[in-house]
């Protein structure tokens, strides 16, 4: 069964847009850590706890910008596509 995402689901998975330079750095830090973890362990072993530990951020800081690990993976994919085609 193929899973399709509706625009509402896409919006729900999107990270909160950073409003400050500090927030933009945090989002980048979270996505960078996720990329390292996925590279080392695989996407199935990516957790928000592992990201928090890798970044030195509190778990609440991760959740401030991303609702869950799937949203982080979506952003990682978006960023990868942007770098590839940009």
Image: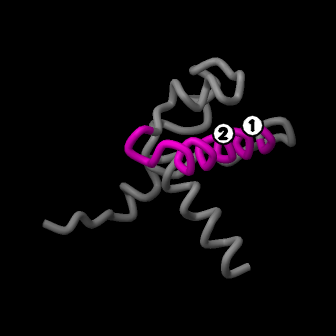
Q: Which residue is mark 1?
A: 26
Q: Does 61 appear above or below 41?
A: above
Residue at (47, 39) in percent of width and height: 46
Residue 61 or residue 45, whichever sits in front = 45
* Residue 48 in the image, given as x and y percentages of width and height: 51, 30
Q: Does 19 appear above or below 84?
A: above
Residue farthest to the left, as pictured? 1
- Label 2 SS: helix
Q: Which residue is mark 2?
A: 30
Residue at (58, 56) in percent of width and height: 76
In the rendered view, does 34 fall on the left or right side of 45?
Answer: right
- Label 1 SS: helix
The picture quadrant where one finds residue 55 is top right
Residue at (62, 66) in percent of width and height: 80
* Residue 66 in the image, given as x and y percentages of width and height: 54, 39
Sort mark 1 into few (<14), some (14-19) or many (20+) by Cα contacts within 10 Å.
Answer: some
Q: How many marks?
A: 2
Residue 70 or residue 7, whichever sits in front = 70
Q: Does 4 appear above or below 70?
A: below
**Stretch in magenta:** 24-45
* Residue 79 in the image, given as x and y percentages of width and height: 64, 62
Residue at (61, 25) in percent of width and height: 52
């Amino acid at each position: 069964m193929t899973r399709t995402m509706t625009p509402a689901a896409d919006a729900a998975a999107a990270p909160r847009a950073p409003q400050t330079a500090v927030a933009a750095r945090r989002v980048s830090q979270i996505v960078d850590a996720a990329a390292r973890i996925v590279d080392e362990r695989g996407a199935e072993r990516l957790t928000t706890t592992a990201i928090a530990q890798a970044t030195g951020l509190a778990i609440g800081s991760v959740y401030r910008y991303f609702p869950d690990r799937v949203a982080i993976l979506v952003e990682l994919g978006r960023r990868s596509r942007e770098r590839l085609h940009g």
